[in-house]
Each structure stands twice: as C-alpha cells, then as structure tokens.
C-alpha cells in the first residue's frame, strides 16, 4: 500500500499496511527526514493522506479550525494551501475542541464533466463539506448540510465509498458511482444526529439517515434485521426511535443526540458500511424516561447500511437507556477471524463502555462480548467472561453503578462514585489497528473512572444540553490506591480469546491512534510528547522519539518519492485532551503550533 487515502488506511478501517521495509530489526534506525508546521493550534486529530507515487507523491493535511488543507509534494517539498474560510461563530457552538478528524481522497469516475478528477473531501466546522481538486488546487464544490446555530457542527472524518452505478436526475444527469459518507457532532447541544451521503462528483445529497425518530427517517424498513428481540419492530412495534422516548419535555427524540462523530468503515465484499451512534441526547437519564420503553433508540447503537440507499441492513443498540455517556461511535473494524474452528466475517468494535463486541457483519449476531479493560458498570453474564448475554444482547448492569434508579432509587442531583470506565471510555475515538499477521488489535487506552451526577437542564438551541456533572479520577490498583502515574496504556488485544496479549503502561491517557505494518512494527504517539515504535509480537519498545508537543492523531505509512517506506505523525493539543498534559502546546510559537514529522530509515 504505497498510498494512504482514507483515515482508516483501508476502507475496512484496519490501519494495517503491507509495507515491510521497516521491521522490528531496523526500526531503531529511523530518523526524522523533515517536518513542517500547520501554523494552527489546537488538537490535530486527523491523520494526513498521501496520494500518488514517485515525483507525484503528495501529502495532504487538514488542520483544526480554520480547516485549511495543506498539500506538500514529497519530492521537492513544494506546497500549496487551500483556505475554505469557515464561519468563526461555529467555534462557540461546538463541544470538545475545534478539531477535524480527517479527509478522504477519491477519483470521480461518472463520465461527467469532472470525470477523472482527483479530489480531497472533508468537513468544515461550520456545517459545510468541500471537495478540492488536487490538480488545480481549487474548490470543486461546497455543500452546506448542517446548522451550527442549532448546535450541529462538522468535525467528522469522511470516507469515499464506491456504489453500484445508478441514475438520479434530481442530483445529476450522470450516474452516481461514489458517495462521500460522514456523520456530525452536537449530541451535547441537543441535536438530532444523522449520517449523510453526498455524490462525490457534485456534492449533492444522496441520502440522510437519522439516529432517532420514525423508521422512515432512520431508514429502517421491512428488510432491516435486528439480531435481538429487544430491537425488533415485530416485538416492540414500529418507530422505536419515537416510542422509546418521552412524549413531552425537553428530552424527546427531536433532541435525542445519537450523532456519529467518528469513524465509518466499509466492507466491499458485502457492500455494507458500518458506524455507531453517540449517547442519546442529555446525559441525564432521568429526563429520558417516560416512553413505551426507556431505551432511547437509536442512541449508543451500531448500524449496518447499504451505501447506495442508506437503508439499514441491521441495527443493534449496545447500551439501552445509557446512564454513563457511553457512546458507540468508535470504529467497527472489518476483519475475518477464526472462531470456533471456522473463518467468520465479522466486525470488531471496542466500545467506550469497556466491552469488545465481535459481531457477524452480515447478520449482526453477537459472537462475543469480553472486557478489554477494567469496568464495573456491568457484570459478567456467563462462565466465558462475556459481559453481554449473547442471546438477548443485553448487559447485566451493576445496580450500584446505575446513576438513576437502582437499589437506592437515585434521582437527579444524587452522585454515583467511582464508575469505571469514565466517560472517556477504556478507549475513546482514537483509531485501533489490526494485523492479519499477528491477529491482534492495537490501541491506546485510558485508566480512568468517574463520579456521575445527573442534573436538570433546559433545551435552548445552540447551547449545551448536557445535564451532568462528571468528575474524572485515576483508576485504583488492587490495593485501592489511585494509579496517578498510569492513567493510560497501549494495548495488544486478541479478539478471539478476549485477552490482552501485552500492554505498555503510560503516565497519561493515550489519545493517539495506532498503525501496524507487515514489518511487525506498531507505531503510536502520546500526550507527553513521545512517538513510539513497538515490536508487534512482544510489545517491546524499539525506540521512542521526543516531540515538541503531544499527539492526538494516528500515524500513517507510505512510500516516499524514492519508493522507500516512510512513517509520519502529526502533533498538536487543544484544551480537552491537552488538559491531561498541561494545556495547549506550544504556548505561543505559531511556527510549531501543529507539526507533521516524517521519518525514514537511516
């Protein structure tokens, strides 16, 4: 894989590269070839792209707000910048920093006037999506899809997915052959989440599927499968995205969150895309009681959809009536695993709640649900160590960690102490990597727990609709002492056994993603300014490089202009992740505000 054209490295989201010039034996000789500044502060959560080979190999980087696209030729280091100039008011209408989680590259092939053009497509914080022609460096199209004044912003990654060619004259006189798929942000602002698909050639809307509301809006129809009775229309009636919510008050499905602010993956074999939704609206579960059920569908759920139509093939709600801000937005990685003596097509989802869900990607059937970190909000349900009943799809909630109700009949204003994991999860949005050589997943993890106090909140468009006070604490060791110097880990996890293969303790939470290569080397960065190369089999640290700032992005690998393998990492912290590492960095020097570092073998 000479190029890197999508955030997950592959459409399946494996972040695995078949390049193997760099190995566990020689990775220690990697040296920095060059670096450049994005001249932009805040958290750089998106990975660069690399498109083309030889003299045409070019790196593309999207910055946090103001969402500039920087292109650097890898042969002569010449560069150009596209500045979309998004509206600055959006910065005050978004949660959790003014980040961007990355772009995708695609070639238009519909036979129309733009046929053959290569474009970098990405979202802008102010609700626009842009496609930039990589040959002319000009904007090809710009589409407004979201209204930040209502709390919906775009910091989301994109993915370009091929579809079976079809005509829609309302969109174009030419066939639609590829779609750009992305979600949005704003659950904390009381928006109603959705995922959209735009025509790559024109930027026009092909479909939009909501996370709450009636079936027609969620794009659930008679062909949609629910693997468990708790999610079936035949058992619970139609329009569960409405009936599982209160019928009055502020916390109705119209403000039900269920946004999809992280990764979308795609399986070309079954022509299916996968993504998850966030927590359901306000974090106060008491306000979300009162429907036919309190499940608050379809928050904290995984959807499998037809990328051509958006219709749901199957859906599974992982956390009904979420009490803990346990989003399900993390990647659902498309892999094949040998389970019970046979090769199975699955997705693997490391949810914030600390459970690794292995699901049949065709039917949604749950095959295992083991803990991949410490958790106490739920209890094991069987002797195999599953934390979810494989027949009902339901976790067994620890009543002592329920934040509303439970044995003490908790109400808003009552505090539940020491819930593990915290709202940051055992793992948050940071991308994992999967190696078919070792059959292990690799990811950064957090060792943090929380106190949780639900609070009453009013809905006002464009303002926070959170309704909770959360206190973050380090995890405790076996003796009850806080692990203040081990708030993070880097983990290798076996999805077949449900066990960790090895771990690397880290002083701070690991908010950077992972990369693994055929050379059996894993790369990741840390908040405390280190970039590490690790032996994928043993977990031994091969080498660490010091950086000028911490990392919240994921590394990439590619072939340079000379045809030899390179590795790159982006640095830059904002106020949220940077809060664990002393705040934004650097303090003032715009020349090193966010940096891209490229390494090669000596």
Image (cartoon, rainbow, N blue to C red):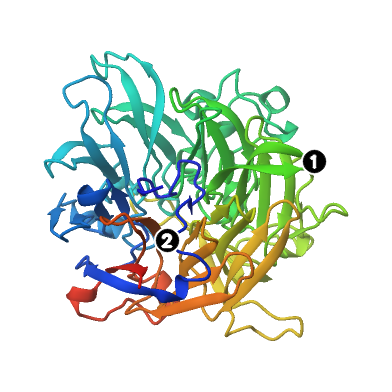
- Residue 144 on image: x %, y %: 24, 38
Mark 2, other Cα within 10 Å: few <14 / some 14–19 / many ≥20:
many
Q: Is residue 261 left or right of residue 317?
A: left
Label placed on residue 341: 1
Q: Secondary structure at mark 2?
A: loop
- Residue 48 on image: x %, y %: 32, 56
In the rendered image, is residue 382 in sight? Answer: yes
- Residue 262 on image: x %, y %: 45, 50
Question: Which of the pair 564/425 is nearer the observer?
Answer: 564
Q: Which residue is mark 2?
A: 554
Question: Which of the pair 255/519 is nearer the observer?
Answer: 519
Q: Are marks 2 and 1 in contact (CB under 8 Å)?
A: no
Marks 2/1: CA distance? 34 Å
Q: Is residue 394 left or right of residue 171?
A: right
- Residue at 27% x, 45% y: name it: 52
Image quarter in which the C terminus is found: bottom left
């Amino acid at each position: 894989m000479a190029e890197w054209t999508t955030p997950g490295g592959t459409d399946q989201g494996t972040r695995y590269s078949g390049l193997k010039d760099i190995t566990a034996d020689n990775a220690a000789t990697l040296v920095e070839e060059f670096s450049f500044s994005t001249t932009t502060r805040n958290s750089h959560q998106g990975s660069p792209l690399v498109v083309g080979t030889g003299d045409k190999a070019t790196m593309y980087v999207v910055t946090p707000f103001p969402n500039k696209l920087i292109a650097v030729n890898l042969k002569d280091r010449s560069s150009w910048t596209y500045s979309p100039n998004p509206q600055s008011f959006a910065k005050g209408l978004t949660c959790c920093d003014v980040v961007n989680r990355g772009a995708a590259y695609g070639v238009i092939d519909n036979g129309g006037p733009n046929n053959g053009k290569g474009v970098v497509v990405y979202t802008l914080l102010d609700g626009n999506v842009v496609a930039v022609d990589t040959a002319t460096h000009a904007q090809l199209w710009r589409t407004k899809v979201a209204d930040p004044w209502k709390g919906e912003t775009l910091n989301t990654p994109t993915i370009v997915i091929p579809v079976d060619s079809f005509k829609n004259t309302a969109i174009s006189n030419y066939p639609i052959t590829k779609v750009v798929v992305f979600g949005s942000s704003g659950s904390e602002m009381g928006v109603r989440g959705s995922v959209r698909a735009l025509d790559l050639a024109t930027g026009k809307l092909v479909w939009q599927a909501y996370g709450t509301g009636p079936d027609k809006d969620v794009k659930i129809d008679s062909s949609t499968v629910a693997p468990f009775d708790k999610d079936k229309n035949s058992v619970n009636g139609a329009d569960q995205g409405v009936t599982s919510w209160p019928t009055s008050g502020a916390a109705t499905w119209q403000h039900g969150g269920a946004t999809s602010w992280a990764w979308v993956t795609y399986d070309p074999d079954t022509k299916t895309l996968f993504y998850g939704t966030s927590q359901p609206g306000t974090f106060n579960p008491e306000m979300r009681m009162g429907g036919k059920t309190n499940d608050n569908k379809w928050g904290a759920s995984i959807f499998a959809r037809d990328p051509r139509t958006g219709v749901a093939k199957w859906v599974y709600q992982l956390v009904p009536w979420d009490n803990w801000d346990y989003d399900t937005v993390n990647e659902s990685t498309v892999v094949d695993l040998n389970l019970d003596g046979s090769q199975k097509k699955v997705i693997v989802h490391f949810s914030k709640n600390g459970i690794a869900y292995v699901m049949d990607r065709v039917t949604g059937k749950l095959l295992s649900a083991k803990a991949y970190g410490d958790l106490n909000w739920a209890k094991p349900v069987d002797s195999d160590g599953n934390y979810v009943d494989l027949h009902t799809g339901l976790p067994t909630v620890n009543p002592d960690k329920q934040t509303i109700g439970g044995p003490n009949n908790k109400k808003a204003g009552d505090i539940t102490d020491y819930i593990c994991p915290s709202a940051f999860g055992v793992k948050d949005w940071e991308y994992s990597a999967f190696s078919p050589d070792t059959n292990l997943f690799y990811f950064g993890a957090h060792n943090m727990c929380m106190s949780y106090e639900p609070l009453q909140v009013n809905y006002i468009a464009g303002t926070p609709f959170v309704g909770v006070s959360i206190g973050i604490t380090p995890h405790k060791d076996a003796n009850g002492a806080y692990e203040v110097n081990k708030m993070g880990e880097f983990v290798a996890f076996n999805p077949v056994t449900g066990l960790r293969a090895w771990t690397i303790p880290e002083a701070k939470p690991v908010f950077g993603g992972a990369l693994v290569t055929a050379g059996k080397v894993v790369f990741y960065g840390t908040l405390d300014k280190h970039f590490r190369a690790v032996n994928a089999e043993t977990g031994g640290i091969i080498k660490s490089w010091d950086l000028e700032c911490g990392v919240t992005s994921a590394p990439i690998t590619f072939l340079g202009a000379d045809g030899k393998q390179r590795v790159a990492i982006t640095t830059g912290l904002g106020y949220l992740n940077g809060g664990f590492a002393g705040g934004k960095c650097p303090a003032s020097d715009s020349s090193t505000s966010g940096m891209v570092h490229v390494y090669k073998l000596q």
